[in-house]
Amino acid sequence: MPVLGFNIEERHIYAAGRIFGPVGRYEKITGKVKFAVNPALAINKTITDLKLAKLNSSGLVEFTSDFSLLIPENKGMSNQKLIVDVVNRGRPRFVSTINLAEAEPPDSTEMPPGDGYLFKNGYSVIAIGWQWDVLRNTNLLGLVAPEAEVISGPEKGLAMVEIRPDRIQHSRLLADRVHQPNPAAKENDLAKLYVRHWEDDSPKLINREEWEFGTLIGGKLEPSREHIFLKNGFQPGLIYHLVYSPERCPVVGVGLLAVREIASFLRAPSRLNPMPKGFDWIFGYGVSQTGRLLRHLMYLGLNTDEQGGKVFDGLLPHVAGSRMGEFNHRFAQPSVQSMPGFGHLPPFSDDKNKDPFSQKADGLLVKLREANTVPKIIYTNTSAEYWRGDGSLSHISMDGRRDLEPNAESRIYLFAGTQHIDSKSLAPPGSDAADGTMGQHSPNIIDYRPLLRAAFFNLDRWVTRNINPPDSNHPRLDDQTAVSRDTALAKFPEIPGMSKPNSEFLWSLREIDLGEAASTGVGSYPPLEGRFYPCFVSAIDVDGNELSGIKLPDISVPLATYSGWNPRHSESGAPDQIIPMQGSTHYLPLTEEIRNILQDPRQSVEKRYKSKDHYLRLVEFEVETLVTDGYLLLEDFEFVVKSQSSKFDSLSQQE
């Protein structure tokens, strides 16, 4: 049994004893779970370097994950359904998102219950740590990975770290964002630092005399194998890649096994199981980074456990686009998403699709079909995943010539006109993106969480009652709602004060060559980048709002133009490039007088809507349609209408 045991560190009644309807109170259990897996099993041989890890006395590889479990205090009130929340960079996301909770403070240790939707319905949720380089604390869940015993030499390979400063900095950690760095080895004669001005610019080598391993402390340069120092400073808006030999070699891919094994274990009855009879249904949720992790898990065939059984009945990968990630190769940094590498390799779609460059055909679900362990899947994306260059490849062929046939086990939804992470309130100008980069425009304010809640509800019914969810809803070639980014930008209205991105600098997925040892999980850096895969986005209307996808009233009864892109602010450098995860909001002129003064091509609010009551009647009609079509829950009708009412009031007060 891959789960050796649990170390319970804390157990308390959740949410100050709040009663969640007939289900009652919930308890929160936190601690660590210890795993041991057999590297000799065929299902585990896909994990890079697992065979090089130290074995215990039983011939198994051990590792430990943090976990946090929310479960009914009265186990008899459970609905026997468990969601595995695959934490994003250490943070649980599922409960606060699906329960429409207010965003919790960064230092919060309690997942806010919001409106209690999940708990009133008896769901249990376990958040599991899987990422080796998370700086673990009471707020962040991580994993202690085994180390691979790799002999030094050319075959050991190198690592590549990406540095994207939003201000001038002279020293940076050897990590993505603020994660645990992998220190440079003492001998690093092959280390090189490259710079490029935009994503697909040719990398230029920086002279070795210009940088070293070190950091500034009190204005003085000190040696540090966990930092890199650049004499003239890392410049905002530029992209740097450091290729070097790391000291450590964690078996990064055991994070995938932690996700698999916690789900498999909790399904089965056991004296160690917090639900002694086990759970009947297991769901997996991942957002952004961890949505890509779930895609990677499926591709490696890891929805099959060591006994050959199905692990997850249903998966909800959110804002993952068509990519996987740095989750299973030597020296991988799981937080990285933009750097060209293993996470940018095909396949991009569920079923076999021929790569026009390599002529190879592959799909995410090939191994799972062979094992008869394909889950039900609902993929949800925003406009941002399309504009960053990869969203459309999940449902359009890699040669860009045809729509892919719908897959019986999955649905793909675009939340029209939205940004990567939803905004929960009106956002002020100059708000920062997740990485600290400022945008030129106010972020996208659409709150799409009710659509995501409905997607989960539909996934549950699909899995447990065999009720089909609504059809996929995304841009398509056959109805001309999928267009190139150049086409969309050319049609975009000339809104006063709005800057459009330079299409030359927009991101795209490209053909990548990671060297002869790539098939073993060892990359050659920097990789060779070749031809471009096609990229499509949604067609837009005269206001600049998207025509395809699931449209909330923000789009169907607009008060603004909403985009999935936002150019970088000049203070963050490279203002002709976009922030890949942030959209923008451009309010309509309130009156015809204002419209004429500003020379705004869009019709004014007063011209569109006779009154607030008229506007809200139109909103209610659109919300009723969403409910009828199955894209929104009836219980969220008032939530969406009230949200639009507040936005109308806010815009009216701007006069």
Image (cartoon, rainbow, N blue to C red):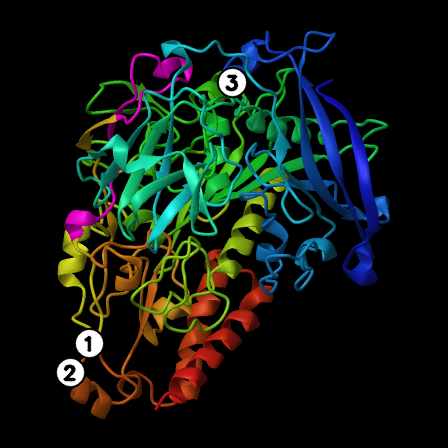
Which of 328 and 456 lies nearest the eye of the viewer? 328
Upstream in sequence: badge 1 or badge 3: 3
> Would you name the residue on which mark 2 appears?
599
- Residue type at mark 1: give it: Pro
SS category of the residue bearing label 1: loop
At horizontal 67% and vertical 64% (from top left) the residue drawn is 115
* Residue ranking furthest to the front: 220
SS type, badge 3 = loop
Q: Nearer the viewer, residue 464 or 383?
A: 383
* Magenta span contains residue 317: no
- Rendered image: mark on residue 395: none
Q: Position of residue 90 (x, y in %)?
A: 58, 43
Using the image, tell me which numbered label, if any, was put on residue 496.
1
Identify the residue at image location x=72%, y=26%. 34
- Label 3 sits on what residue type? Ile
Are the residues at dot 1 and dot 2 in contact (C-beta closer than 8 Å)? yes
Quarter occupied by the N terminus:
top right
Around disc 3, counting alpha carbons within 10 Å, would you say few (fewer than 14), some (14 to 19), or many (20 or more)?
many
Q: CA distance from mark 2 to mark 3?
A: 59 Å
Q: Is residue 282 left or right of residue 134?
A: right
Q: Quadrant of the C terminus?
A: bottom left
Asked if residue 274 shows in the view, the reply is no
274 with respect to 306 (left or right): right
Residue 514 inside the magenta-drawn segment: yes
Q: Is residue 326 visible?
A: yes
Distance of label 1 from label 3 (alpha carbons): 52 Å
Residue at 43% from the left image edge and 31% from the top image edge: 326
To which quarter of the image does residue 588 belong?
bottom left
Q: Which residues are magenta?
A: 503-527
Query: Viewer-nearest of labels 2 and 3?
Result: 3
Spot occupied by residue 359 in the image (x, y as percentages of width and height): 22, 18
Q: Which residue is mark 3?
A: 47
